[in-house]
Image (cartoon, rainbow, N blue to C red):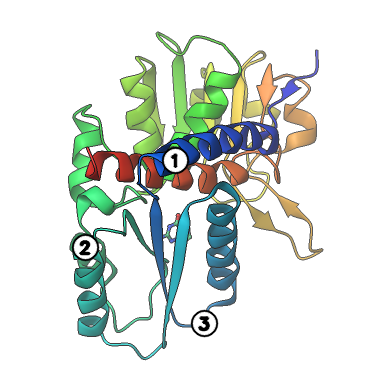
């Protein structure tokens, strides 16, 4: 039987309506959640993302600000800006859009953001808290993936989750989140031997490897939940995921489409983190 499609677009819309109500409640108490995004340089994709983030904030009533800095900005000048924002009580979330120009050390910048304001969930303190199962600001894409799995209403506890890809922004943190939900988690990557055989054991398969349509039906157990985190633009201009959607949807129980699956969840979780940070800071 063909899989049910999990519409990230629809889920994101529902959650954003809820976040809008929550923001209105906070405003009644005199708290306006605020997000500041720093964009260094003029990378076209980054410009689009930053504008999308600002627009999403505006739609739900979060105060947002974009600081645009020249591509020749020095590391010290960027650090100074971050320090200023760390101390600004009206700024609850700070996001430095990546990638950064090569004169700037990305790690050093992420480390400079106050962990309480790190709405990306990239700071080592927040990554560490996630790893030891403490509550903290969660990285946006992994948290969005968990929300999509919850939508299926299938219990995660005890299930075998296989994650393909071990990046710091998706593969590793989503593995920790699934573990926290009591799944049995297998982390796999580009060097894993017999990947199709391992993937085929998964009740929940999360694919974040960045290879267009790599995961075919040979990788998927009938009835599995398949979450496709990839966004790849083919030469034809068509956008596809890391999963061969048309054939995998015939055997999976649930599957996320690309586009319209995981993508819309990432910014939604950024909004959620900004509200969460505002609540914690004013606690
Ligand atoms: N560049 C691409 N994705 C992201 C993201 O999630 N956060 C930041 N800060 N930069 C990005």
Asked if one can make out residue 64 in the rendered structure from this viewpoint, the answer is yes
Q: Position of residue 95 (x, y in %)?
A: 37, 61
Give the residue at mark 2. 86
- Which comes sooner in the sequence, label 3 or label 1? 3
Q: Taking 175 as reference, is 141 left or right?
A: right
Q: Please tell me which residue is depicted at 46% across the width and 26% down the height of the picture.
A: 162
Describe the element under mark 3 as helix, strand or loop: loop
- Which comes sooner in the sequence, label 2 or label 1? 2
Relative to 29, residue 84 above or below:
below
Q: Position of residue 279 (x, y in %)?
A: 31, 39
Q: CA distance from mark 3 to mark 2?
A: 24 Å
Q: Please tell me which residue is depicted at 49% across the width and 40% down the height of the picture.
A: 24
Asked if one can make out residue 165 in the rendered structure from this viewpoint, the answer is no
**Which disc number belongs to residue 42?**
3
Q: Please tell me which residue is depicted at 20% across the width and 83% down the height of the picture.
A: 76
Label 2: few (<14), some (14–19) or many (≥20) C-alpha neighbours in 10 Å: many
Tell me the quarter of the image containing the N terminus: top right
Give the residue at mark 1. 272
Mark whose residue sits in front, 3 or 1:
1
**Which disc number belongs to residue 156?**
none
């Amino acid at each position: 039987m063909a899989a049910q499609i999990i519409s990230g677009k629809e889920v994101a819309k529902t959650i954003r309506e809820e976040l809008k109500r929550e923001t209105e409640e906070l405003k009644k108490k005199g708290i306006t959640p605020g997000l500041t995004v720093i964009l260094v340089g003029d990378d076209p994709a980054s410009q689009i993302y930053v504008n999308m983030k600002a627009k999403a904030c505006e739609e739900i009533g979060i105060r947002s600000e974009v600081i645009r800095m020249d591509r020749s900005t020095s590391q010290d000048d960027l650090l100074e800006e971050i320090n200023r924002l760390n101390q600004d009580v009206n700024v609850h979330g700070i996001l430095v859009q990546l990638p950064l120009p090569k004169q700037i050390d990305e790690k050093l910048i992420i480390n400079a953001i106050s962990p309480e304001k790190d709405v990306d969930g990239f700071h080592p303190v927040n990554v560490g808290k996630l790893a030891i199962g403490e509550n903290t600001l969660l990285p946006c894409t992994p948290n969005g993936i968990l929300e999509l799995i919850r939508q299926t209403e299938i219990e995660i506890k005890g299930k075998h989750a296989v994650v393909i890809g071990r990046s710091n922004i998706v593969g590793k943190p989503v593995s920790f989140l699934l573990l926290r939900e009591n799944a049995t988690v297998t982390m796999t990557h580009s060097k894993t031997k017999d990947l199709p055989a391992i993937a085929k054991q998964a009740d929940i398969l999360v694919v974040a490897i960045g290879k267009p349509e790599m995961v075919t039906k040979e990788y998927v157990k009938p009835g599995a939940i398949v979450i496709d985190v990839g966004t790849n633009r083919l030469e034809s201009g068509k956008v596809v995921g890391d999963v061969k959607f048309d054939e995998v949807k015939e055997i999976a129980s649930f599957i996320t489409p690309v586009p319209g699956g995981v993508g819309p969840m990432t910014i939604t979780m950024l909004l959620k983190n900004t509200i969460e940070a505002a609540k914690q800071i004013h606690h």
